[in-house]
Amino acid sequence: MSRRTTIRLSDAAGWRSPVIFLMLMAVVNGISAATWGSLLNNFAIEQANFTGREIGILQSLREVPGLLAFTAVGWLLFIREQNFALLALLFLTAGVAFTGFVPFTLGLYAITMLMSFGFHYYETMNQSLSLQWLPKDRAPQLLGRIFAAGSAASIVSYGVIFLLWKWLKLDFVGVYLIGGGLGLALVIYLWLAFPRFEAEVKQHTHLFLRRRYWLYYLLTFLAGARRQIFIVFAGFLMVEKFHFSVAGIAALFMINALMNVFIMPKVGALVGRWGERRALIFEYAGLILVFVSYAFVTDPWIAAGLYIADHALFSWALALKTYFQKIADPRDIAPTAGVAFSINHIAAVVIPVIFGLIWLQNPSMVFLLGAGIAGLSLLLALLIPHRPEPGRETLLGMSRAPHAAE
């Protein structure tokens, strides 16, 4: 079947199905994230001589493209969502491949921006395509399987990184090139081997904020703030305070990914059974405990356990996506994916720099503030109905029917 062939979702079958396409995109993202993430802190500290200040600036710059994710809607006037997702993965994999060639501050900032534009545009399109292509009654389970596929790719990547570093003695340049190059090869395969899938509902191509989506927007904003504390400072804690090596970080990441392969399908099934309200309450309550524990941990093995628990709890965030799917007008999914991703990154742009300065004075305070953010998310999750749908977006004002203009 030619890559230029366009088929309707209802006609897609076999291995060239939308679900397989989404899984393979997740594999590319998993390889890229594993390569970049497992090496970054060691590369920044050992090669670029970064301190908490520089790593905070880098992570803030990395999130600027996320803040600009709303611009993806404009690009959809010229390029299909599916093609745009693959183009974004092209930038992501190229950025990863060439990271090892820039062991200095400005170079690392620049290549991170290239990689980040690819990652954030991909994530925006991936969320939009997933919620359009997956049926509502099976979305949590299928999302769990898609995430598990990405985690399986990460496991293989972490294992390869461990072997390349520990036994073959490759340097940062070689490992980054191999990881980014493999991801790039898979992007080309996706472009050539799969048809274009025609969505059932044409998406809006203009930006807007719907008043009835306010709870989703706010939870998305807080999720971005919490996740930055985990991504930036939990990993930095492992290297700076507990002196984890590249091999140690790769092994830790591999454990996380291995857990995801087994737990993500189960998480998806539980979200389908429990509902989004209970699933998010469970996630946020667990994160409060983890962040408070981070603030006072002194044992590296306990810290590693917290890191694994933290990562596992974030897998429950798929419930926020399916919550939106249930309350959304189908035509709103693509533009809202871009807007929500930008909202998610408002705090993400600011937190690494501000919290990086706090880190220099009191690292524990960074994690205590994270616990406070998780607590606020928990309170807001209590407003989600047991059965959300259009007109029942929150427990406040459920009797009022939604209008397209809101």
Image: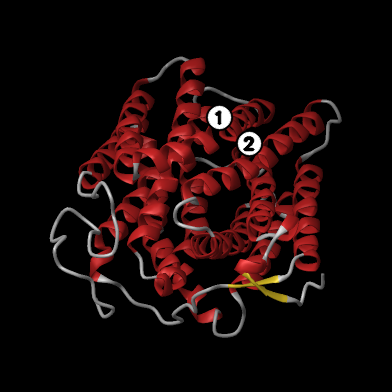
- When asked about the image quadrant of residue 114, the answer is bottom right
Q: Which residue shows up at 30% across the image and 33% down it?
A: 365
Foreground residue among 266 and 45: 266
For label 2, the SS is: helix
- When asked about the image quadrant of residue 289, the answer is top left
> Is the C terminus in the top left, top right, bottom left or bottom right quadrant?
bottom left
- Residue 163: image x %, image y %? 80, 29
Foreground residue among 236 and 151: 151
Q: Residue furthest bottom?
A: 77
Foreground residue among 22 and 352: 22
In the picture, measured across the screen, residue 399 lies left or right of residue 127, that is left
In the picture, measured across the screen, residue 364 lies left or right of residue 308, that is left
Q: Could you tell me if the residues under marks 2 and 1 are in contact, i.e. CB atoms within 8 Å? A: yes
Q: Which residue shows up at 54% across the image and 38% down it?
A: 265
Label 1: which residue? 239
Label 2: which residue? 42
Q: Is residue 22 above or below residue 206?
A: above
The answer to whether residue 162 of the structure is visible from this angle is yes
- Residue 31: image x %, image y %? 69, 46
As shown in the figure, which amino acid type bears the numbered disc 1?
Answer: Val
Q: Is residue 355 above or below residue 187?
A: above
Q: Which residue shows up at 52% across the image and 22% down it?
A: 242
- Residue 112: image x %, image y %? 60, 57
In the picture, measured across the screen, residue 146 lies left or right of residue 276, that is right
For label 1, the SS is: helix
Mark sitting earlier along the chain (2/1): 2
